[in-house]
């Protein structure tokens, strides 16, 4: 994972449900998860794969949006910032099941706790969520431009997103 010191290097690993669980949920129709038949038996329905929390009550509205991401051009990635959404879960689901993308996450309060910094590569038909307050790098497509459906509660204020910039980049091998 990481020593978490700016100016150092971390390696992205293949995402796994347990390794990712401190930061959010891995979203996908995965064998071994409970499901029920749907659509007259032609589908398996996997319920409640991630809570989408709104910590502002009626002040914020659920926003279903699309992020159209350009593929990462330069590897390794030089990460200069992290962001967080203190008041909402954020969910990203690629609209192309063959897309690979990079997820960089970190726990912490007012500032990222870099001892918890981790980077994951997500492959196949899976999405991710970030729990409210989890620091993360912006969504990063790896091999090709990719659109992502996103769910997040927002009210349009500056409190929708907090950004922390680093004096020196952290290098992410992906």
Image: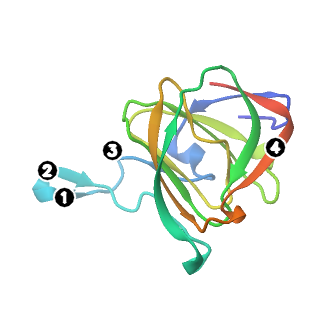
Q: Earlier in the sequence, mark 2 or mark 4?
A: 2
**Badges 2 and 4: C-beta atoms under 8 Å apart?**
no
Residue 31 marker = 3
Residue at (63%, 30%) from the top-left corner? 12
Q: Provide residue 44's location: percent of width, then percent of height.
A: 23, 52
Instruction: Give yes or no for contact between labels 1 and 3 (Cβ–Cβ under 8 Å).
Output: no
How far apart, in angstroms, are the residues tagged by discs 2 and 3? 16 Å
> Nearer the observer, disc 3 or disc 4?
4
Q: Is residue 133 visible?
A: yes
Residue 42: mark in rendering:
2
Residue at 12 percent across and 54 percent down: it is: 41
What residue is disc 4 on? 165
Indicate whether 135 appears above or below 6. Answer: below
Q: Is residue 51 visible?
A: no
Identify the mark nearer the N-term, 2 or 3.
3
Residue for point 32% across, 56% down:
46
Do the residues bearing badges 2 and 3 touch, measured as CB atoms within 8 Å?
no
Snapshot quadrant of residue 14: top right
Q: Which one is in front in this view, the residue at disc 1 or the one at disc 4?
A: 4
Residue under circle 1? 38
Q: CA distance from mark 3 to mark 4?
A: 39 Å
Q: CA distance from mark 1 to mark 3?
A: 16 Å
Q: Nearer the viewer, mark 2 or mark 4?
A: 4
Residue 117, picture quadrant: top right
* Rendered location of residue 70, percent (x, y): 54, 30
First-in-chain label (1 vs 4): 1
Kindly state the secondary structure of the residue where label 1 is placed.
Answer: strand
């Amino acid at each position: 994972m990481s020593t978490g010191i700016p100016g150092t290097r971390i390696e992205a690993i293949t995402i796994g449900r347990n390794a990712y669980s401190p930061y959010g949920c891995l979203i996908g129709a995965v064998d071994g998860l409970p499901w029920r038949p749907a659509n007259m038996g032609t589908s398996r329905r996997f319920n409640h794969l991630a809570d989408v929390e709104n910590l502002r009550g009626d002040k914020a509205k659920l926003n279903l949006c699309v992020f159209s991401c350009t593929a990462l051009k330069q590897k390794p990635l030089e990460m200069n910032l992290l962001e967080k959404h203190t008041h909402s879960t954020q969910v990203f689901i690629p609209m192309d099941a063959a897309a690979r993308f990079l997820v960089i996450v970190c726990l912490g309060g007012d500032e990222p706790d870099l001892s918890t910094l981790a980077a994951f590569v997500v492959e196949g038909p899976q999405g991710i969520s970030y729990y409210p307050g989890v620091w993360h790098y912006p969504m990063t497509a790896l091999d090709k431009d990719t659109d992502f459906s996103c769910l997040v509660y927002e009210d349009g204020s500056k409190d929708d997103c907090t950004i922390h910039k680093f004096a020196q980049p952290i290098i992410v091998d992906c």
